Amino acid sequence: MSLTTELRTLQEIDDELAALETALAEIDARLAHSEALTASEAAFNEADARYQELRRSQRDLEAGIADLNAKIVPEERRLYDGSVRNPKELTAIQHEVEHLKTQRGALEDRLLEVMEALETASAARAEAEARLAEARREREAETAALRARREDHAARLAAALARREAHAARIPPAALRLYDDVRRRRGHAVARIQGSSCTGCRVAIPESVRRKSFDPSAIPQCPNCERILYVG
């Protein structure tokens, strides 16, 4: 087997390794983060925040109304129980009661608005919660599938690394160093001669280099991109 054929086989293994490493990186990224789940969580948090805000407003308004009622009841009692006989004082009490009732009416109107908004917010929160639960179930299933795929890819990667190590041991060190250097700089170290051109850079190959590619022990290189060349 020619040296360039050995290097071509090594490149095929390295391409497989690169593809597996890329696939594993993508799987790890998907395991670390789910855009769908994050979006569902954000939607629920927003709906829940709105719901909780309205619940606080409801409690505050109800407390305000209760506080006004606590002021109105004794004042109305004084107004009608005969304990106050002074006309001016009775008029002042009446005005105070009317003022308090006006305040209470405004709070009650606002409470009605909040209760209506709260009903809508509660439905939106329930819907967002259901979507979040579904997203979590889907994420759980997706995670299980991704972990299974990761285990398979990791096993294939380990096997490919072992094949690479065994195959690289058959290649002379100088040739292996050259291959690794060109691959690091060019991405692919080995290219085919098609017609009279290098398929790596599409530049014409001198006839002397083309003839050298038929020598099983030689390592012809493209004068332009320095890739190792073979005819096939």
Image (cartoon, rainbow, N blue to C red):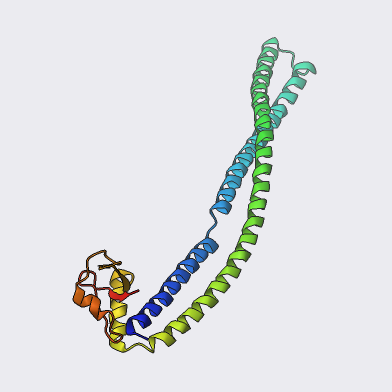
Residue 27: where, in percent of width, then height?
A: 52, 65
Q: Nearer the viewer, residue 222 or 147?
A: 222
Residue 183: where, in percent of width, then height?
A: 32, 74
Q: Is residue 133 above or below residue 60?
A: below
Quarter containing the C terminus: bottom left
Q: Is residue 92 visible?
A: yes
156 to the left or right of 193: right
Residue 95: where, in percent of width, then height?
A: 66, 15
Q: Residue at x 53, y 72 (%)?
A: 153
Q: Is residue 63 visible?
A: no
Q: Nearer the viewer, residue 110 or 72?
A: 110
Q: Nearer the viewer, residue 143 or 39?
A: 143
Q: Is residue 123 above or below residue 105?
A: below
Residue 41: where, in percent of width, then height?
A: 59, 50
Q: Residue at x 65, y 47 (%)?
A: 131
Q: Is residue 167 above or below residue 68?
A: below
**Residue 226 falls in image quadrant:** bottom left
**Residue 93 falls in image quadrant:** top right
**Residue 7 falls in image quadrant:** bottom left
85 to the left or right of 177: right
